[in-house]
């Protein structure tokens, strides 16, 4: 029997600006922290950069055509702040606005709903020079940027995402140093997380005000189901700390207007500086929560495991993707049910889910059965969550195209569509053809 999804279910793919656009010196675009980071020797595999990426800035018409061919009804993309306001604050760049304006029109003409994200990690370098997300003024810079974008696109965009994965932007960027701007300062990371959330809260009413009635605003968080590595009390507590940092540090302020007390106590002097009205603003009601889910986390106590005193382990016999991430679809069901029961978001979207595989172009085809199995299992888990009452409204695959996978450069392929980087030719993978069937039938075969 086919597994049918609710009527009006959103089926799409997701991408982000720096990962696909290229054309970093065209159309008046300013420099972002990812330009500088990727051009710093040793920061990315093979020294790869997003200078050319998947050349979407020039091939966007073809890419919209591909989505139409795949039968999709939504497209999550991100808007590059440095294209819109090259210096981060101040004058807007019409050529940048025009690019997204044309993209939105082409999507709508193809019957595909534009689902833009305002911030997918490409902070204008000029703002980083003023302290970037560590500067409390960043909340205001972001609100101004949100106003510029929504004044231009708000007549056509009906679903907005403020931020993508503030956890990753804050902790990979400022504590682990594996992402731009590449710092190793846990206290800074917590302060950045707070400012990212504050900027979200500031932008929500602006996006609503500049859009048509009924437009929805949300945020996309990277969330995981967290299991302790054993039943030992130390591991159980380590898993709680990990959950506190990854999940609750973002969910609690957004949905409850407070940071989790156990995490504030644990952070001690590392806790962020928070002003009186901040949490009220952060908890401004949103219309949906976007969930980016790839894997669960299995966590062990480890006194050497950084400030958190914890370490992620890979369970023996786990099936892994090319990223080394465990394939664990049951965690998606568990996570969705937990979010619904504990935080009650009005609606949820899976704003990213997908896997990297060792894709090879052979005789003009790409056979990727692992990806089909991964997507199919996660969609079955999502369907189960819906059956359990979770108001899940849509599912967006990461990603439409193979692209620049941050510090991994071009070594990891996540697309439903293969990109031959030598020629920029696009080839729909077997998983793309499979997903087309799912999206058009609104059901898993
Ligand atoms: C997420 C990011 C996205 C992509 C996937 C694989 O953390 O939001 O840009 O890199 O992982």
Image (spheres, rainbow, N blue to C red):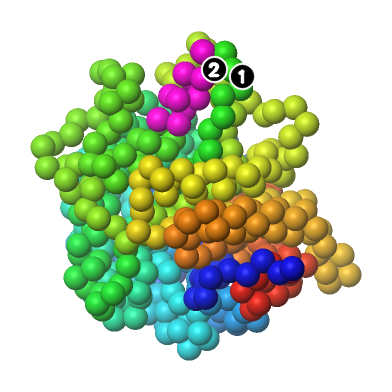
Side of 148 where 40 appears, left or right: right
Looking at the image, do the residues carrying marks 1 and 2 touch, with CB atoms under 8 Å apart?
A: yes
Side of 325 where 357 appears, left or right: right
Secondary-structure class at tag 1: loop
Q: Which residue is mark 2?
A: 235
Q: Position of residue 339 (x, y in %)?
A: 43, 46
Residue under the image location 75 percent in, 39 percent down: 319
Q: Can you tell me whether the CB of the residue at mark 1 lies under 8 Å from the nearest atom of ligand 1?
A: no
Ranked by sequence position, the earlier of labels 1 and 2 is 1
Q: Which residue is mark 1?
A: 230
How busy is the neighbourhood of tag 2: few (under 14 within 10 Å), some, or many (20 plus)? many
Q: Is residue 404 visible?
A: no
Corner quadrant of residue 383: bottom right
The stretch of residues the image draws in magenta is 233-244
Residue 208 or 30: which is nearer the viewer?
Answer: 208
Residue under the image location 56 percent in, 66 percent down: 13
């Amino acid at each position: 029997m086919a597994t049918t999804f609710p009527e009006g279910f959103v089926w799409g793919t997701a991408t982000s600006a720096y990962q696909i656009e290229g054309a970093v010196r065209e159309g008046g675009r300013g420099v972002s922290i990812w330009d500088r980071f990727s051009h710093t020797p040793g920061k990315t595999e093979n020294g790869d950069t997003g200078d050319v990426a998947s050349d979407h800035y020039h091939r966007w018409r073809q890419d919209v055509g591909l989505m139409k061919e795949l039968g999709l009804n939504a497209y999550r993309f991100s808007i590059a702040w440095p294209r819109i306001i090259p210096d981060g604050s101040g004058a807007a760049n019409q050529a940048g606005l025009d690019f997204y304006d044309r993209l939105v029109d082409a999507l709508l003409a193809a019957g595909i709903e534009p689902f833009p994200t305002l911030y997918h990690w490409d902070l204008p370098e000029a703002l980083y020079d003023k302290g970037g997300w560590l500067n409390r003024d960043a909340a205001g810079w972001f609100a101004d940027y949100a106003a510029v974008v929504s004044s231009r696109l708000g007549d056509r965009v009906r679903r907005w995402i403020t931020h993508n994965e503030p956890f990753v932007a804050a902790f990979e960027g400022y504590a682990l140093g594996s992402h731009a701007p590449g710092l190793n300062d846990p206290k800074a990371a917590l302060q950045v997380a707070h400012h990212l959330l504050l900027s979200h809260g500031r932008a929500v009413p602006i996006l609503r005000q500049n859009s048509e009635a009924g437009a929805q605003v949300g945020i996309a968080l990277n969330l995981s189901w967290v299991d302790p590595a054993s039943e030992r009390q130390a591991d159980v507590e380590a898993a709680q700390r990990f959950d506190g940092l990854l999940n609750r540090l973002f969910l609690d302020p957004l949905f409850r207007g407070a940071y989790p007390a156990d995490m504030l106590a644990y952070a001690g002097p590392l806790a962020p500086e928070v002003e009186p009205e901040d949490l009220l603003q952060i908890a401004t009601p949103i219309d949906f929560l976007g969930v980016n889910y790839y894997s669960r986390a299995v966590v062990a106590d480890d006194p050497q495991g950084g400030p958190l005193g914890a370490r992620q382990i890979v369970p023996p016999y786990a099936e892994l993707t090319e990223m080394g991430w465990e394939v664990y679809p049951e965690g998606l069901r568990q996570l969705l049910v937990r979010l619904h029961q504990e935080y009650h978001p009005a609606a949820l979207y899976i704003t990213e889910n997908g896997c990297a595989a060792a894709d090879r172009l052979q005789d003009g085809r790409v056979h990727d059965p692992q990806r089909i199995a991964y997507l199919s299992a996660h969609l079955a888990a999502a369907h189960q969550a819906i059956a359990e009452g979770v108001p899940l409204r849509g599912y967006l695959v990461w990603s439409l195209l193979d692209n620049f996978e941050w510090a991994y450069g071009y070594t990891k392929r996540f697309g439903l569509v293969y990109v031959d980087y030598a020629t920029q030719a696009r080839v729909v993978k077997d998983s793309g053809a499979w997903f087309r069937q799912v999206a058009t039938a609104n059901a898993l075969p």
